[in-house]
């Protein structure tokens, strides 16, 4: 894989993380996404990995990101790793007070270093959280 393609992956991921952390704010969204961008949202419940929703274009993806509470912190865990067909993969983390989880972002960058297609694949809920908030743990 060429250095230029690796750089596109790193640029697209950096822009994606910024728009995620900005909850879909217009400026970061236009830097990370375009009208051809697609987000596939997968589930964490059984059957795990089932496609729940496909969002297309800047506005649909912005709306989805905008429902994330301000207290939720999401970030990439490391550098994007090349995958098949020009795609990249990177683990992400989700934190909300005592809740910690993660998942996988699998994405295809556009030639402009934006997100052409991204799969949001959360890990299953940690065992202690599957039946609600565990004793002694908080979400706020």
Image (cartoon, rainbow, N blue to C red):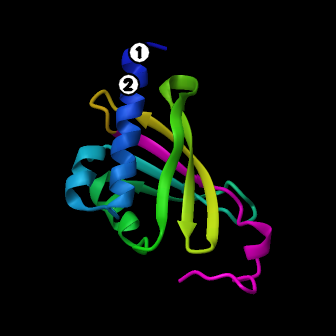
The question of residue 135 being in magenta is answered with yes
Q: Position of residue 44 (x, y in %)?
A: 67, 62
Residue at image point 31% right, 52% down: 57
Q: Is residue 57 above or below residue 73?
A: above
Q: Is residue 5 above or below residue 101?
A: above
Looking at the image, can residue 116 be seen?
no
Q: The magenta stretch spans which residues?
A: 115-140
* Residue that carries the numbered disc 1 in the rendered image: 3
Residue at image point 47% right, 64% down: 73
Quarter-of-image position of residue 130? bottom right
Secondary structure found at label 1: helix
- Between the C-alphas of marks 1 and 2, the distance is 6 Å
Residue 7: numbered disc: 2
Residue 20: numbered disc: none
Q: Position of residue 136 (x, y in %)?
A: 72, 85
Secondary structure found at label 2: helix
Quarter-of-image position of residue 84? top right
């Amino acid at each position: 894989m060429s250095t230029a393609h690796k750089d596109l992956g790193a640029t697209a991921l950096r822009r994606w993380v910024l728009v995620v952390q900005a909850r879909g704010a217009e400026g970061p969204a236009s830097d990370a996404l375009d009208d051809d961008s697609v987000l596939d949202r997968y589930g964490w419940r059984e059957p795990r990995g089932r496609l729940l929703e496909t969002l297309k274009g800047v506005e649909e993806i912005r709306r989805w990101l905008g429902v994330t509470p301000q207290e939720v912190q999401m970030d990439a865990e490391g550098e994007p790793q090349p995958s098949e067909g020009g795609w990249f993969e990177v683990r992400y983390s989700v934190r909300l007070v005592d809740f910690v989880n993660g998942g996988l972002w699998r994405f295809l960058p556009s030639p402009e270093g934006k997100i052409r297609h991204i799969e949001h694949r959360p890990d299953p809920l940690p065992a202690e959280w599957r039946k609600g908030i565990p004793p002694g743990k908080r979400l706020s």
